[in-house]
Image: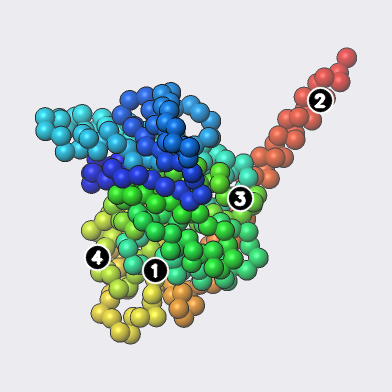
Amino acid sequence: MCTTCGCGTGEVRIEGEAAHHDHDHGHGHTHDHVHADGTTHSHEHGHDHGHAHSHAHPHDEAAQHSHAPGVSAKRMVQIEQEILAKNNAYAHENRQSLAERGIFALNLVSSPGSGKTTLLCKTISMLGAQALAVIEGDQQTSQDAQRIRATGAQAIQINTGKGCHLDAHMVGHAMQQLRLQDDSLLMIENVGNLVCPAAFDLGEAHKVVILSVTEGEDKPIKYPDMFRAASLMLLNKIDLLPHLNFDVAGAIAFARQVNPQIRVIQVSATSGAGMDEWLTFLREGLAAAHGARQETVDQLKQRIAALEAQLQRP
């Protein structure tokens, strides 16, 4: 859980699972597993279990400590550092797995109601035959995953309960349940929140922050960590600008005030404005992921050839 907001006390569910798993992240990574037949058993082990991810991630110990009287600020920082360190280890596993298969992964973050799912549906439609999959993150319901599947794309829903963000452990396990293709696109739609998802690396190539023109143009300086962590800002719903008092130049200036390197694309899933530029970004990322994978394959082939040559020498 994040010690900032106290989230994560609810049960996390990933679609298609027959079991629920609660995790205590304070000491030694202990799991309690409740299976479909009603039996329960516990596991206590270190962090290294390859890429076999478990299912839920409510970070219970931090929930217990976040408001506990007598807990020092130093201890709170230590708890948060432990949580993020474990998350980063899982994120490294995810990133390595994705890179080995040439999969381009994006973490889409925003406030609730920014239009992420509508934008995703439009993107999927415009990409046509491009192989892709979507991981949907919400506290409850599978409505967004159902909307994605209605486009013909595969999607899996993660419900975080009271949790306000996805983490790398949840995402890694969801990746295992998807039929991911090599050289494909993976879109992760995070829980609507501009605070906590900024701190949690999921193993993605980029965080893409979506800011709707129906929100305030000062969001980037109100939530600087998120805009600082993002590589790209999609300024969404620009078809509504004639009906709003929204300062586009001001919003972009605020974003670049906290992140001078951030790229900005103005888009509308309704009118199609800016969608070609957004699709170009995606295709360039896909090509780069494929190229990096091919380079790794070529390097391995060269090493094998060199070893074979050495073995053939008298």
Name which residue type carries label 1.
Gly
The numbered disc on residue 308 is 2
In the rendering, at what x and y percent does residue 303 appear?
A: 73, 30
Distance (Cα) linking label 3 and label 2: 33 Å
* The residue positioned farthest toward the top in the image shown: 314
Instruction: Determine whether label 1 and label 4 are within 8 Å by CB.
Output: no
In the rendering, at what x and y percent does residue 134 appear?
A: 51, 57
The numbered disc on residue 115 is 1
Mark 4 or 3 closer to N-term? 3
Residue 312 is left or right of residue 110, and the answer is right
Residue position marked by numbered label 3 in the rendering: 180
* Point 54% across, 54% down: residue: 186
Distance (Cα) linking label 4 and label 3: 38 Å
Compare residues 191 and 140 and report the one nearer the observer. 140
Residue 174 is left or right of residue 255, and the answer is right
The numbered disc on residue 218 is 4
* Point 56% across, 43% down: residue: 176
